[in-house]
Amino acid sequence: MLKSTPELILQDAMGELYWASADLGTTWTQPCGKVSHTGEEGCFKNPGEVVPGGRGRAMGAIRPHPKRAGWLLSFVRTCDAGPGPGGMACRVNRLLASGDLGKTWTDMVANSKGKVASFVDFDWAPDDGAGPYPPIYATVFRDGTKFAAYRGAWDYNIDFVRSEDLFSTHTLVEQCANAFEILNGDVYTASPPDCADYHKHGAKNHPSSEVNTNNVVLKISTNQGKSFNTACFPMNLPANAFEIYDFHADDAGPDFIAVDHIETSAIEARAPMSQLYASDESMSFFSMSMRTMVKDSGGSFVQDFAKVLGLEGVFIANQISYKAFIDGAAIRNGDYSAYYESRISFNAGGTWHKIPAPATDAEGVKYACAEDEFDCERYGLHLHGAVDWDTSEDWNGRLGGVYTRSSAPGVIISTGNVGDAVITDEPARVNTYISRDGGATWIESKKGAYIYEFGNRGGLLVVAKQFMPVDVIEYSLNEGKSWSTLKLANSIFVHNIRVDPSSKGHVFIIHGMTAESVHADPNRGSYFVVDFDEIISGGKVCGAADYEMWSPAAPGSHGCLMGQKYELKRRKLDVECFNDEDFDRAYTIVGTCECSRVFDTECDYGTERVYNVPNASQWPHCAPSDNVNTQCAALNHKPPTPSSNLRIISGDKCTSPGAALGDDGPRRRGHHRGRMFVQFIMLLAFLGVAAYGAMYVHANYDLGTLSTTVPNAARNAINGAYEKFQDTFGKREQATPPGYFEPLGDFAAEDEI
């Protein structure tokens, strides 16, 4: 059994110099040519200098193996600048491997001896540790003649392959698969639908080998690429991009897939939206869960979609109101944000509901909808998601989104507002909200926008006011019911608050800037380390009498959540004490529930929820969708859809499904949706690997252990490094990167400490 290598740090100085540490910074391997001692034995060699001509450049960050110590992959452009091999050889993209932490490298184009003409993309394949070399997945041109005609787009001659000997040999996994991802051991590929036709008839039917990416097929393999299922989506529109969500590492296949379709309506085509689909047990027939889910209008494909960690089946998402597409004149300059609405689901996307507004604001004033001010049909609590943070150009407009921790099940904190839409352009009207019962009820805890973080397994909340210089932070020991202040040594614009990745500790890092611009203060980066064990030295440790039992449930479900009844221990709201370091909020299953049409079903393929059913006894109702995709080949093997158009939600544990589905309903269920969360994005445009200067840390770290031999860039970036690494390897808890965990490396180095 292979073990992870959690103490690795790599520092990349703009693709030219590399430092490496295998012991969290205690000792460092220096870059070749820059070592301070005599001799260069054991230095870290720049992979760009290994390629023919010695003038290549690593494209993107070096990728460590998640389990095999010392193994690295680097994607290298053969010619970067100056004299090189020239001609066709200069266009070749090479994949290099090192098994000794960068001391030596193997060029796998050369190692293939002509069997690989150029690499396109790469990743480590699932590895059981049995072979001498770690297996590698890659998309490649195998035919040099075809590569010579390549013009940088999708191409029928790009294939998905696997090698277990550094590409001395390789096996074909999927022909024409131009894009791929590996997630929890499953393999996802995207390929043109007419691949077989091209390779059968060639140029006769295809005058160009370039692919029209307006219609791409997503395939899923749960057996490491031995066979693939085609994913069928009911909207009969081409797909432009996919985002796959997988909440359970031990179960095969995805739980949700968000698809960016190519809409035919101009007003829909301009909208920053995707469609969210739920998977079934076959991983072939995806049903509509949410239409018009808000996504980033840029190229990152970030979604406003968050799982409430620690609870089964609870999700929060933002969608564009249907009214935006009726009143197209109201959409000005492509800005749809006035129609962003928040929704919550307590049954894994089977049904979505408005989030109820708190009874009062933070000052005790009652909330009520004024028809002359709001569209009361859309009135409620609206919360920010990852998109608002991700699309902001600087720190002055980044609002924290929905945030939860598995160590604090049921506790949710987010910025947002009460009204008829999410406010994205007026931070002064944004407030901070908290729920302690999994989203069933909410309080407005703070007036204004704050940045926030959990500690002490949810028992300690720390917040700071955004968008203005502050010399205090605030903390709460009762989940936001009341707050205490802590004065800082000087005022700063707070950007992030950090804690250990498990959110169990009491030590927080508060970081930001002392001035808004580098011109006002060239050394404006600043941070504070706050140890609440010292601040609250007499802090009481909670005893048995300080806790209560809580049963998370969907509102109105008689205590049920995803077909089961749960109990978990939580601290009483009026008690101020620290959770013991061994405190665990794990839940206990105390019963199961009979399947309910309202709480335990979702729509089957080709149908979707109708929420305005006149007869309440018929709700929730699933009606056939318009223009359903009937061409997907897998539909020839689909089980019949019951007359109710329902299926039991994946992962739901309810019993006796017959009454919920109808007498003719099959007893099948969707694919299980668990609690582990990982995601990836597959964009269907050809994107080179071009990110430089990334630094990765795969564990907790101590800022004091950084060697003085590490360059300033490394020390400047360390605050955000471990989140970047965890995101790469699927260790982060959040569905999409929330604002307060955005890696600092994404911003100008001079802006941060």
Image (spheres, grey):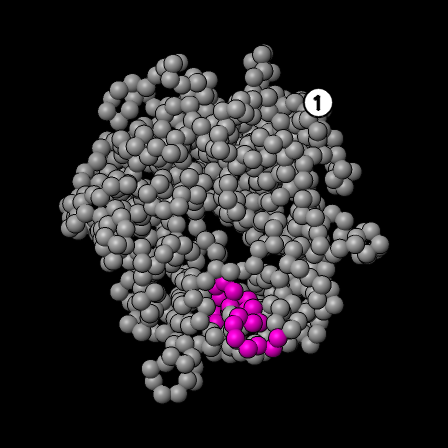
Residue furthest to the bottom in view is: 38
Number of numbered tags placed on the structure image? 1
Residue sitting nearer the eye, 508 or 713: 713
739 horizontally vs 251: left or right: left
Please state the horizontal and vertical placement of residue 474, each as a whole percent of the image. Answer: 22, 40
Residue sitting nearer the eye, 752 or 278: 752
Residue 609 lies in the magenta-colored region: no
Q: Where 488 falls versus 548 (above or below)?
A: below
Residue that mark 1 sits on: 643
Q: Where 519 falls versus 380 (above or below)?
A: below
Residue 78 in sight here: yes
Q: Residue at x 23, y 24 (%)?
A: 363
Q: Please state the extent of the stretch shown in magenta in the rendering.
A: 58-86
Query: In the rendered image, which quarter is residue 634 located in?
Result: top right
Provide the major secondary structure of the magenta segment.
Answer: loop
Please state the horizontal and vertical placement of residue 736, each as a whole percent of the image. Answer: 46, 45
Residue 406 in sight here: no
Query: In the rendered image, which quarter is residue 432 located in?
Result: top left
Residue 69 lies in the magenta-colored region: yes
Q: Where 172 falls versus 220 (above or below)?
A: below
Query: In the rendered image, which quarter is residue 721 located in?
Result: bottom left
Q: Which quadrant, please, contains the C terminus?
A: bottom left
Please state the horizontal and vertical placement of residue 452, each as a whole percent of the image. Answer: 31, 42
Q: Residue at x 62, y 43 (%)?
A: 240
